[in-house]
Image (cartoon, rainbow, N blue to C red):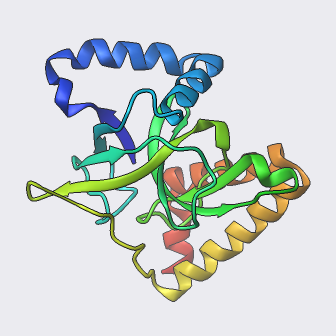
Amino acid sequence: MEVVSNPAARPENERMQAVGDFICADGRRMQAAASLFRSGALGEITSEVAGMSMGSTIPHGAQIRIAPGAPPYLRGTVIAFVAGGKTVVHRIRWQRRWGRGRHFVITQGDGMILPDMPVERAAVLGPVTAVRRNGAWSPLEAAPVRPRRERVLSVLVFVGGATLLEIHPPLARWLLSALNAAERRHAWIRALLY
């Protein structure tokens, strides 16, 4: 699920989008901006999201609040992070405090079967604290329970990715990225499971 705008600044959307594109175009600028946000200097952000990767937890077009804060977070916390030049909102599936994997978290959208490519902790902006539904702010719901066959496949891919992350982080990132790209192109998971 991608964060698309700041609804409080609608007349300035084009300018804000240009600033965001400029920041995200360079890894150093992106990390500096993420660090500044995590420090709390900018306060809480309200944004609108696009996409269905968080399922009914955060529906397409919903407004969210992102609080500043540095990892680690509890497993299951919905976080905002920068990946591929975009701000993404997904739930933490795995994180480690030691070993080679300590610099990464693995996330997964509530509406997705496969976990995401590992995200560097430096790219994490903070936790999503609330979603606006029917005109009122409410806390986020717990992750929905998926069908057993989807959970089994998700766990197998997740365990393989987390194990590989401890052995060879670039290979883990490549594997999870390739599996997700193949799913987007060919929908092989649904064909396999159903």
Indicate left or right for 89 with 45 as reference: right
> Percent position (x, y) of residue 135?
8, 54
Residue at position x 31%, y 46% in the image = 65
Indicate left or right for 119 with 79 as reference: right
Residue 82 against residue 99 in the figure, above or below: above
Residue at position x 46%, y 40% in the image = 68
Total numbered labels placed on residues in the image: 0
Indicate left or right for 115 with 49 as reference: right
- 187 or 111: which is nearer to us? 111
Residue 6 against residue 71 in the figure, above or below: above
> Percent position (x, y) of residue 12?
20, 16
User: Seen from this angle, which residue lies furthest left?
Assistant: 135
> Percent position (x, y) of residue 162?
76, 62
Residue at position x 29%, y 48% in the image = 64
> Percent position (x, y) of residue 56?
28, 66
User: Seen from this angle, which residue lies furthest right?
Assistant: 167
Residue 167 occupies which quadrant of the picture? bottom right
